Image: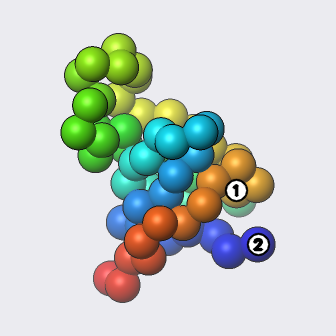
Amino acid sequence: MDIAKVGSIIEFKEGLTGVVEKVNENSVIVDLTYMENFRDLDLDRRTVVNHKNYKIIKESFS
């Protein structure tokens, strides 16, 4: 299982995407404002996603 790094773009929960802001032992905190349709979806700005429940779309190289 690959673990995302801060700045990585991940996909989870059937199509939601976001930028990883913090990596924890079992999860990541994700900024959802990365999505173009963020305002239309009426979601919170951030969410927590378990490492088992996302796919890395674009790696962070910082």
Farthest residue, direction top: 42
Residue count near mark 1 (Cα–Cα under 10 Å), binned few <14, some 14–19, many ≥20: some
Q: Residues within 10 Å of mark 2 (few under 14, many from 20)?
A: few
Left of 27 or right of it: where is 19?
left
Residue 51's label in the rendered image is 1
In this view, the residue in front, 46 or 34, is: 34
What residue sits 36% from the left and 84% below the top? 61
Residue placed at 23% from the left, 39% from the top? 36
According to the picture, the residue beneath numbered tag 2 turns out to be 1
Q: Residue 55: x percent and y percent?
A: 60, 60
Counting from the top left corner in percent of width and height, residue 19 is at: 38, 54
- Contact between marks 2 and 1 (CB within 8 A): the answer is yes
Residue 45 versus residue 18 in the image, above or below: above
Q: Is residue 29 visible?
A: no
Q: Amino acid at mark 2?
A: Met
Q: Quadrant of the C terminus?
A: bottom left
Q: Earlier in the sequence, mark 2 or mark 1?
A: 2
In the rendered image, which quarter is residue 37 located in? top left
Local secondary structure at mark 1: helix
Of the numbered discs in the image, which one, if any, rests on residue 13?
A: none
Inspect the image, locate mark 1, and give the three-letter code of the amino acid beneath it: His
Taking 16 as reference, is 7 above or below it? Answer: below
- The answer for how far apart the CA atoms under marks 2 and 1 are is 8 Å
